[in-house]
Image (tube, rainbow, N blue to C red):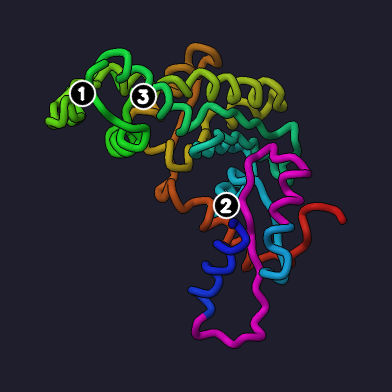
Amino acid sequence: VAKQLLKHLISLVMEDEPPDMIIRGVIGAPALASKKNKKTLLEITDGVLHDVMIVSEPFAVAYGLNLYSSALIIDIGAGTVDLCRMSGTMPTEEDQITTLKAGDFVDQVFLRLIQKKYEHANFTLNMVKQFKEENGFVSAQGERVSIELPVDGKPTAHDVTEELRKACRSIVPEIVEGIKKLVASFDPEFQRGLKRNVVLAGGGSQIIGLQREIEQYMKESLGYGRVTRVEEPLYAGANGALLLASNFSFYAAFPQ
């Protein structure tokens, strides 16, 4: 299925191009994707792309932003949160951490909390996921938020302020624990610079108040922290991949 999707995407952009054009691709993968995972990705591209490069998603973000050193990139996706420490060289496994508490995890927590509070309401995971993506927040202050859910077929407003806040906060402790590990194992001389340059990317980075929440956790556990968000959280990785494709010769990321 993935291979057919890739073929379809390429056909859309190659309609007006010569048939003998060389097609090269950069594929983003979780920071600690296994060799088996990467080999599977290469198999998907076999016969479709001429050359392929597989890179960790946070590295692609960092490359697109020209952040090659003293930066800690956090890419918050649906299935994983990937943390990558940039220290002037190509990041190794020791520079990266992947956690599984990401967007999908928030959706599940939010779903369970609403089910517990409103037993008579009818709704699906997709309904609460869409609501979270449009209204997700972690800040303690702000307006109340409510979602319309059917009760006996009638759309009814349900206050889910605390449930949404709690669900969105559920990913923060593991993110900060990952930050702490990457900072603590870094050269002490450059730890402060790393803490000053934590960058959020990915769809999950759009949760309102997440930057300040992580900074507060960092202040408590690391003494200091400054967190920013990329201007294009959904496309920062793709932008970096495009830059990589433009600047580098291609090679297979998995040794044959």
Residue position marked by numbered label 2 in the rendering: 66
Range covered by the magenta-colored residues: 15-42
Residue 86 place in picture, x, y as percent: 65, 40
Classify 10 Å Cα crowding around label 3: few (below 14), some (14-19), many (20 and above): many
> Which residue sits at x=36%, y=24%?
111
Residue 85 place in picture, x, y as percent: 64, 36
In this rendering, is residue 10 above or below 172?
A: below
Please state if 138 lies on the left or on the right of 100 as rendered.
Answer: left
User: How far is disc 3 from disc 1 in space, using C-alphas?
Assistant: 22 Å
Residue type marked 3: Leu
For the residue labelled by badge 3, is the local secondary structure a helix, a strand or a loop? helix
Residue position marked by numbered label 3 in the rendering: 111
Residue position marked by numbered label 1 in the rendering: 142
Residue 102 place in picture, x, y as percent: 50, 31
Disc number lying in front (3 or 1): 3
Residue 97 place in picture, x, y as percent: 65, 31
Please state if 51 lies on the left or on the right of 101 as rendered.
Answer: right
